[in-house]
Amino acid sequence: MTTCGSSLNFTTDLKRTLQAPVTLNDGRKTRRVTTQEAALLRLAEKALKGDPRALEKLVSLSATLSTNNAESPSKTMAADDQAILDRYRQLILNETNSPFETDDDGEK
């Protein structure tokens, strides 16, 4: 999706922009945060001042985050379960290929 040799795609530009540091003036002191954090702080500030669109967006982002966090443990658990099943499968295969296995007549 590049138009010239050094162009970056939109995803790369967005990531870079959101990670760019900015300086916030918070009353008496200043601090450096990412553009992403500054935008979220501004959204929260607007929501707390009664802006209904900002409040709706903040609640929506919060719900999305909660949903993503709720799904993460199950994905991790599934990976753990898969590892257990893989070990069990290998154990069974090793037993099947042992020199003591019987033939179809039940003889060794």
Image: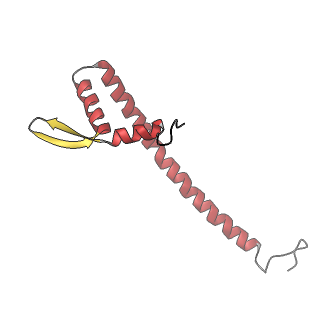
105 sits to left or right of 82 = right
Residue 34 place in picture, x, y as percent: 29, 41
Residue lying farthest front?
4
Residue lying farthest right?
105
- Quadrant position of the C terminus in the picture: bottom right
Residue at 31% over, 24% down: 55
Q: How many marks?
A: 0
70 sits to left or right of 30 = right
Residue at 14% over, 41% down: 30
9 sits to left or right of 38 = right
**Residue 87, above or below 3:** below
Residue lying farthest left?
28
Q: Is residue 66 visible?
A: no
3 sits to left or right of 63 = right
Residue 49 place in picture, x, y as percent: 21, 22
**Residue 101, above or below 45:** below
Q: Which quarter of the picture shows residue 58?
A: top left
Residue 93 place in picture, x, y as percent: 72, 69
Q: Is residue 94 visible?
A: yes
**Coloring basis for residues:** secondary structure
Residue 63 place in picture, x, y as percent: 40, 33
Residue at 44% over, 37% down: 67
Residue at 11% over, 40% down: 29
Q: Which quarter of the picture shows residue 16?
A: top left
- Quadrant position of the N terminus in the picture: top right
